[in-house]
Amino acid sequence: MAIVDRKKELYIVNGFNVSPAEVEALLLLEGSLAQAAVVGVPDPVSGEAGVAYVVPRPGTRADPEALRAWARANMSGYKVPRRMIVVDALPTNVNGKIDKLALRERLAHEG
């Protein structure tokens, strides 16, 4: 699998570069998710950490702790998002792409 991501979207966890696009693709393999968006946020321990916003497939429910357990079993530890936030929909920009800036701003306001 080849993952292409913008360099500015990469985040660094304990010295490891993490591609949000790769983590999103891996999360979608779990099967219960329609969409996933991962953003890097500052972290006092690891430098940065991933936060995943996930949208469940219609007719399914997403349990953040079960998703983190699945992620821990299926990807390198430094790639596992620190938080999984279940949402009904992801914000999009005028081009129809996921608006990751809006997700970061939401995190800043929610804490």
Image: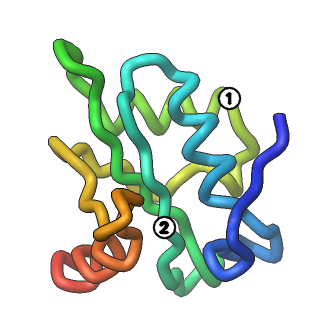
Residue located 81% across and 76% down the image = 15
Under circle 1, the secondary element is helix
Figure quadrant of the C terminus: bottom left
Residue kind at label 1, given as amino acid type: Asn
Figure quadrant of the N terminus: top right
Q: Could you say which is closer to the camera, residue 99 or residue 49?
A: 99
Q: Is residue 25 left or right of residue 5?
A: left
Residue 19: assigned label: none
Q: Could you say which is closer to the camera, residue 102 or residue 18?
A: 102
Tell how many labels.
2
Q: Where is residue 80 in the image (x, y as percent from the top left)?
A: 59, 49
Q: Disc 1 designates what residue?
A: 74
Residue located 70% across and 56% down the image = 78
Residue kind at label 2, given as amino acid type: Val
Q: In this view, does 8 lie to the left or right of 81?
A: right
Q: Where is residue 6 in the image (x, y as percent from the top left)?
A: 69, 71
Of label 1 and label 2, which has the lower sequence position? 2
Q: Is residue 67 left or right of residue 92?
A: right
Q: Quadrant of residue 92?
A: bottom left
Task: Identify the image's colour scheme: rainbow, by chain, secondary structure or one colour.
Answer: rainbow
Q: Where is residue 52 in the image (x, y as percent from the top left)?
A: 42, 53
| Residue at the extreme top of the image, as rendered | 59
Relative height, residue 8 to residue 62 (above, below): below
Q: Disc 2 designates what residue?
A: 39
